[in-house]
Image (cartoon, helix red, strand yellow):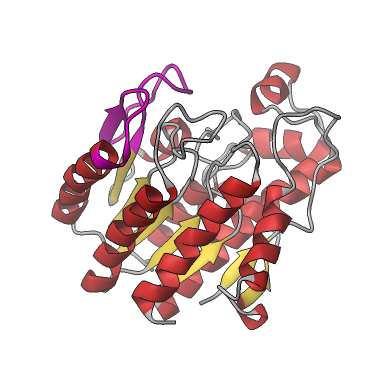
Amino acid sequence: MDVFYSDHYTLPLPDGHRFPMAKYRMLRDFLLQEEIIDESELKASPLADEELLCLAHTREYVESVRDGSTKHEIIKRIGFPSSPGLYQRSCATVGGALEAAKSALRDSIAGNLAGGTHHAHTDRGEGYCVFNDIAVATRYLLQQNLATRIAIIDLDVHQGNGNSSILYHDPGVFIFSMHGEKNYPFIKVPSHLDIALPDHADDALFLERLDEGMRSVAAFAPDYIFYQMGVDPLKEDKLGKLDLTFDGLMERDVRVLSFAKERGIPISLALGGGYADPIELSVQAYANTYRVAKRIYGI
Protein backbone atom coordinates (compact mmCIF):
# COMPACT_ATOMS: atom_id res chain seq x y z
CA MET A 1 0.00 0.00 0.00
CA ASP A 2 1.60 3.25 -1.11
CA VAL A 3 1.33 6.00 1.50
CA PHE A 4 2.46 9.49 0.52
CA TYR A 5 3.81 12.02 3.00
CA SER A 6 4.74 15.70 2.83
CA ASP A 7 5.56 16.58 6.44
CA HIS A 8 9.07 17.64 5.37
CA TYR A 9 7.33 20.75 4.02
CA THR A 10 6.24 22.84 6.97
CA LEU A 11 5.07 26.35 7.77
CA PRO A 12 6.54 28.98 10.10
CA LEU A 13 3.54 29.49 12.36
CA PRO A 14 3.53 32.04 15.19
CA ASP A 15 3.55 30.85 18.81
CA GLY A 16 0.09 29.92 19.99
CA HIS A 17 -1.29 29.25 16.50
CA ARG A 18 -4.23 26.85 16.84
CA PHE A 19 -3.34 24.61 13.86
CA PRO A 20 -1.45 21.47 15.01
CA MET A 21 1.17 21.35 12.25
CA ALA A 22 3.24 18.78 14.15
CA LYS A 23 0.55 16.10 13.72
CA TYR A 24 1.70 15.16 10.21
CA ARG A 25 5.18 14.04 11.25
CA MET A 26 3.77 12.57 14.47
CA LEU A 27 1.43 10.40 12.43
CA ARG A 28 4.13 9.14 10.09
CA ASP A 29 6.32 8.25 13.07
CA PHE A 30 3.44 6.58 14.90
CA LEU A 31 2.48 4.44 11.89
CA LEU A 32 6.06 3.19 11.69
CA GLN A 33 6.53 2.70 15.44
CA GLU A 34 3.31 0.71 15.73
CA GLU A 35 4.27 -1.29 12.62
CA ILE A 36 0.98 -0.37 10.96
CA ILE A 37 2.86 0.47 7.78
CA ASP A 38 6.36 -0.39 6.66
CA GLU A 39 9.03 2.11 5.68
CA SER A 40 8.98 0.62 2.17
CA GLU A 41 5.37 1.76 1.74
CA LEU A 42 6.17 5.43 2.38
CA LYS A 43 6.71 7.72 -0.61
CA ALA A 44 7.59 11.41 -0.55
CA SER A 45 4.87 13.46 -2.20
CA PRO A 46 5.93 15.30 -5.36
CA LEU A 47 5.05 18.95 -5.88
CA ALA A 48 2.04 19.48 -8.12
CA ASP A 49 2.85 21.93 -10.91
CA GLU A 50 0.86 25.01 -11.82
CA GLU A 51 -0.95 23.34 -14.72
CA LEU A 52 -2.28 20.62 -12.43
CA LEU A 53 -3.44 23.16 -9.86
CA CYS A 54 -5.28 25.05 -12.59
CA LEU A 55 -7.51 22.03 -13.17
CA ALA A 56 -9.44 23.27 -10.14
CA HIS A 57 -8.18 26.80 -9.48
CA THR A 58 -7.83 30.05 -11.37
CA ARG A 59 -4.33 30.82 -12.59
CA GLU A 60 -4.51 34.22 -10.90
CA TYR A 61 -5.11 32.62 -7.50
CA VAL A 62 -2.39 29.97 -7.98
CA GLU A 63 0.16 32.61 -9.02
CA SER A 64 -0.79 34.84 -6.09
CA VAL A 65 -0.03 32.05 -3.61
CA ARG A 66 3.23 31.29 -5.40
CA ASP A 67 4.50 34.88 -5.44
CA GLY A 68 3.04 35.95 -2.10
CA SER A 69 0.59 38.49 -3.51
CA THR A 70 -2.57 36.80 -2.22
CA LYS A 71 -5.04 39.36 -0.97
CA HIS A 72 -4.99 39.92 2.77
CA GLU A 73 -8.63 38.96 3.20
CA ILE A 74 -7.99 35.59 1.53
CA ILE A 75 -4.89 34.92 3.65
CA LYS A 76 -6.95 35.77 6.71
CA ARG A 77 -9.65 33.28 5.67
CA ILE A 78 -7.03 30.60 5.02
CA GLY A 79 -5.63 31.07 8.51
CA PHE A 80 -1.94 30.62 7.63
CA PRO A 81 0.55 33.47 7.10
CA SER A 82 1.77 33.96 3.54
CA SER A 83 5.22 32.45 2.96
CA PRO A 84 7.18 30.52 0.30
CA GLY A 85 6.59 27.43 2.41
CA LEU A 86 2.84 27.83 2.09
CA TYR A 87 2.98 27.33 -1.66
CA GLN A 88 5.39 24.38 -1.49
CA ARG A 89 3.49 22.60 1.24
CA SER A 90 0.18 23.10 -0.58
CA CYS A 91 1.66 21.80 -3.85
CA ALA A 92 2.96 18.72 -2.01
CA THR A 93 -0.47 18.08 -0.54
CA VAL A 94 -1.99 18.03 -4.03
CA GLY A 95 0.91 16.03 -5.46
CA GLY A 96 0.47 13.38 -2.80
CA ALA A 97 -3.26 13.16 -3.48
CA LEU A 98 -2.72 12.68 -7.19
CA GLU A 99 -0.03 10.04 -6.75
CA ALA A 100 -2.20 8.21 -4.21
CA ALA A 101 -5.07 8.24 -6.72
CA LYS A 102 -2.87 6.71 -9.42
CA SER A 103 -1.54 4.14 -6.96
CA ALA A 104 -5.04 3.14 -5.88
CA LEU A 105 -5.94 2.47 -9.50
CA ARG A 106 -3.11 -0.09 -9.56
CA ASP A 107 -3.34 -1.52 -6.04
CA SER A 108 -6.99 -0.88 -5.01
CA ILE A 109 -6.06 1.40 -2.08
CA ALA A 110 -3.51 4.09 -1.25
CA GLY A 111 -3.16 6.94 1.20
CA ASN A 112 -2.01 10.53 1.55
CA LEU A 113 -0.84 11.61 5.02
CA ALA A 114 -2.14 15.09 4.26
CA GLY A 115 -4.92 16.52 2.13
CA GLY A 116 -8.65 16.53 2.34
CA THR A 117 -8.41 20.31 1.88
CA HIS A 118 -12.10 20.56 1.12
CA HIS A 119 -12.59 24.24 2.00
CA ALA A 120 -10.48 25.54 -0.89
CA HIS A 121 -12.55 27.10 -3.69
CA THR A 122 -11.68 27.89 -7.30
CA ASP A 123 -10.38 31.39 -6.59
CA ARG A 124 -9.56 31.33 -2.88
CA GLY A 125 -8.73 29.21 0.11
CA GLU A 126 -10.19 29.19 3.58
CA GLY A 127 -10.28 27.10 6.74
CA TYR A 128 -6.59 26.02 6.60
CA CYS A 129 -7.07 24.88 3.00
CA VAL A 130 -5.09 26.51 0.17
CA PHE A 131 -5.51 24.23 -2.88
CA ASN A 132 -8.20 21.57 -3.12
CA ASP A 133 -6.36 18.28 -3.54
CA ILE A 134 -9.44 16.13 -4.09
CA ALA A 135 -10.88 18.50 -6.70
CA VAL A 136 -7.59 18.58 -8.65
CA ALA A 137 -7.21 14.79 -8.54
CA THR A 138 -10.86 14.23 -9.47
CA ARG A 139 -10.60 16.37 -12.58
CA TYR A 140 -7.29 14.74 -13.51
CA LEU A 141 -8.75 11.23 -13.35
CA LEU A 142 -11.79 12.27 -15.38
CA GLN A 143 -9.81 14.17 -18.02
CA GLN A 144 -7.34 11.32 -18.43
CA ASN A 145 -10.20 8.79 -18.68
CA LEU A 146 -8.81 6.93 -15.68
CA ALA A 147 -12.26 6.99 -14.06
CA THR A 148 -15.74 7.92 -15.25
CA ARG A 149 -17.84 8.00 -12.05
CA ILE A 150 -16.12 9.38 -8.96
CA ALA A 151 -17.64 9.48 -5.49
CA ILE A 152 -16.24 11.72 -2.77
CA ILE A 153 -17.13 10.41 0.68
CA ASP A 154 -16.38 13.28 3.04
CA LEU A 155 -16.80 12.36 6.72
CA ASP A 156 -14.87 15.27 8.21
CA VAL A 157 -16.94 17.08 10.84
CA HIS A 158 -16.89 20.21 8.64
CA GLN A 159 -18.91 20.32 5.44
CA GLY A 160 -16.86 20.16 2.25
CA ASN A 161 -17.98 23.48 0.80
CA GLY A 162 -14.98 23.78 -1.52
CA ASN A 163 -15.50 20.33 -3.02
CA SER A 164 -19.07 21.30 -3.80
CA SER A 165 -18.35 24.77 -5.15
CA ILE A 166 -15.77 23.37 -7.58
CA LEU A 167 -17.16 19.98 -8.56
CA TYR A 168 -20.93 20.04 -8.08
CA HIS A 169 -21.72 20.52 -11.78
CA ASP A 170 -18.99 18.21 -13.12
CA PRO A 171 -20.50 15.19 -14.88
CA GLY A 172 -19.52 11.90 -13.30
CA VAL A 173 -19.02 13.26 -9.77
CA PHE A 174 -21.07 12.50 -6.64
CA ILE A 175 -20.23 14.33 -3.42
CA PHE A 176 -21.49 12.93 -0.10
CA SER A 177 -20.69 15.06 2.94
CA MET A 178 -21.74 14.12 6.49
CA HIS A 179 -20.88 16.79 9.01
CA GLY A 180 -21.92 18.82 12.03
CA GLU A 181 -25.00 20.90 11.28
CA LYS A 182 -23.94 23.84 13.46
CA ASN A 183 -20.23 23.74 12.69
CA TYR A 184 -17.96 25.54 10.21
CA PRO A 185 -18.56 26.52 7.43
CA PHE A 186 -21.64 28.30 8.68
CA ILE A 187 -22.85 28.90 5.12
CA LYS A 188 -22.76 25.50 3.39
CA VAL A 189 -22.42 24.96 -0.36
CA PRO A 190 -24.83 22.13 -1.17
CA SER A 191 -23.32 18.75 -2.08
CA HIS A 192 -25.17 16.06 -4.02
CA LEU A 193 -25.94 14.55 -0.61
CA ASP A 194 -25.51 16.42 2.66
CA ILE A 195 -26.29 14.76 6.00
CA ALA A 196 -26.11 17.25 8.86
CA LEU A 197 -25.70 15.90 12.39
CA PRO A 198 -26.76 17.61 15.62
CA ASP A 199 -24.21 18.58 18.26
CA HIS A 200 -23.13 15.64 20.43
CA ALA A 201 -24.21 13.00 17.92
CA ASP A 202 -22.82 9.68 19.16
CA ASP A 203 -21.49 6.54 17.47
CA ALA A 204 -24.93 5.00 16.96
CA LEU A 205 -26.49 8.03 15.28
CA PHE A 206 -23.39 8.67 13.16
CA LEU A 207 -23.29 5.09 11.88
CA GLU A 208 -27.04 5.01 11.23
CA ARG A 209 -26.83 8.12 9.08
CA LEU A 210 -23.65 6.86 7.40
CA ASP A 211 -25.51 3.76 6.25
CA GLU A 212 -28.14 6.01 4.67
CA GLY A 213 -25.46 7.94 2.84
CA MET A 214 -23.66 4.84 1.64
CA ARG A 215 -26.88 3.56 0.05
CA SER A 216 -26.89 6.70 -2.09
CA VAL A 217 -23.23 6.17 -2.98
CA ALA A 218 -24.07 2.60 -3.99
CA ALA A 219 -26.89 3.86 -6.20
CA PHE A 220 -24.46 6.21 -7.94
CA ALA A 221 -22.25 3.17 -8.74
CA PRO A 222 -18.81 4.86 -8.66
CA ASP A 223 -15.73 3.40 -10.28
CA TYR A 224 -13.43 5.44 -8.00
CA ILE A 225 -13.73 6.79 -4.43
CA PHE A 226 -11.94 9.57 -2.61
CA TYR A 227 -12.37 9.09 1.15
CA GLN A 228 -11.92 12.21 3.28
CA MET A 229 -11.24 10.46 6.60
CA GLY A 230 -11.17 13.45 8.95
CA VAL A 231 -11.10 12.39 12.61
CA ASP A 232 -12.52 15.62 14.03
CA PRO A 233 -15.86 13.92 14.88
CA LEU A 234 -13.90 12.49 17.85
CA LYS A 235 -15.39 13.55 21.19
CA GLU A 236 -12.09 15.06 22.37
CA ASP A 237 -11.68 17.24 19.26
CA LYS A 238 -11.57 20.96 20.06
CA LEU A 239 -13.41 21.90 16.85
CA GLY A 240 -15.74 18.94 16.46
CA LYS A 241 -18.88 19.23 18.67
CA LEU A 242 -19.66 15.53 18.08
CA ASP A 243 -19.17 12.64 20.52
CA LEU A 244 -17.64 9.80 18.54
CA THR A 245 -15.27 7.31 20.16
CA PHE A 246 -12.25 5.55 18.68
CA ASP A 247 -14.43 2.48 18.20
CA GLY A 248 -17.09 4.50 16.41
CA LEU A 249 -14.57 6.04 14.04
CA MET A 250 -13.05 2.64 13.31
CA GLU A 251 -16.48 1.18 12.55
CA ARG A 252 -17.05 4.14 10.22
CA ASP A 253 -13.85 3.19 8.42
CA VAL A 254 -14.84 -0.49 8.30
CA ARG A 255 -18.08 0.38 6.53
CA VAL A 256 -16.52 2.73 3.97
CA LEU A 257 -13.50 0.59 3.19
CA SER A 258 -15.47 -2.67 3.10
CA PHE A 259 -17.87 -1.04 0.66
CA ALA A 260 -14.98 -0.26 -1.70
CA LYS A 261 -13.20 -3.59 -1.22
CA GLU A 262 -16.28 -5.74 -1.77
CA ARG A 263 -17.16 -3.90 -4.98
CA GLY A 264 -13.63 -3.70 -6.33
CA ILE A 265 -13.67 0.12 -6.36
CA PRO A 266 -10.25 1.80 -6.02
CA ILE A 267 -10.13 4.15 -3.04
CA SER A 268 -7.61 6.70 -1.79
CA LEU A 269 -7.47 8.20 1.68
CA ALA A 270 -7.18 11.91 2.41
CA LEU A 271 -6.30 12.87 5.98
CA GLY A 272 -8.79 15.64 6.73
CA GLY A 273 -9.22 17.43 10.04
CA GLY A 274 -8.10 16.47 13.52
CA TYR A 275 -7.67 18.95 16.38
CA ALA A 276 -7.92 16.92 19.57
CA ASP A 277 -6.53 18.03 22.89
CA PRO A 278 -4.05 16.43 23.29
CA ILE A 279 -3.24 16.10 19.58
CA GLU A 280 -1.94 12.57 20.18
CA LEU A 281 -5.58 11.45 20.24
CA SER A 282 -6.09 12.68 16.67
CA VAL A 283 -2.88 10.94 15.62
CA GLN A 284 -4.12 7.69 17.14
CA ALA A 285 -7.48 8.06 15.38
CA TYR A 286 -5.82 8.67 12.01
CA ALA A 287 -3.61 5.64 12.56
CA ASN A 288 -6.64 3.52 13.38
CA THR A 289 -7.99 4.15 9.88
CA TYR A 290 -4.81 2.65 8.49
CA ARG A 291 -5.14 -0.29 10.90
CA VAL A 292 -8.61 -0.93 9.51
CA ALA A 293 -7.41 -0.56 5.91
CA LYS A 294 -4.62 -3.05 6.44
CA ARG A 295 -7.00 -5.56 8.00
CA ILE A 296 -9.72 -5.26 5.39
CA TYR A 297 -7.35 -5.42 2.42
CA GLY A 298 -5.13 -8.10 3.98
CA ILE A 299 -1.96 -6.12 3.27
Placement of 267 over or under 92, stated as above or below: below
Residue 49 visible somewhere in the drawing: no
Quadrant of the rendering where the C terminus is positioned: bottom left
Q: Quadrant of residue 124?
A: top right
Magenta span includes 200: yes
Considering the whole magenta stretch, tell me its main secondary structure: loop
Placement of 270 over or under 12, stated as above or below: below
What is the x, y in percent for residue 69?
80, 28
Magenta span includes 188: yes
What is the x, y in percent for residue 209?
22, 39
Q: How many marks?
A: 0
What is the x, y in percent for residue 153?
35, 48
The segment highlighted magenta reads 178-204
Q: Residue at x 47, y 34 (%)?
A: 162
Q: Residue at x 48, y 50 (%)?
A: 134
Placement of 170 over or under 161, stated as above or below: below
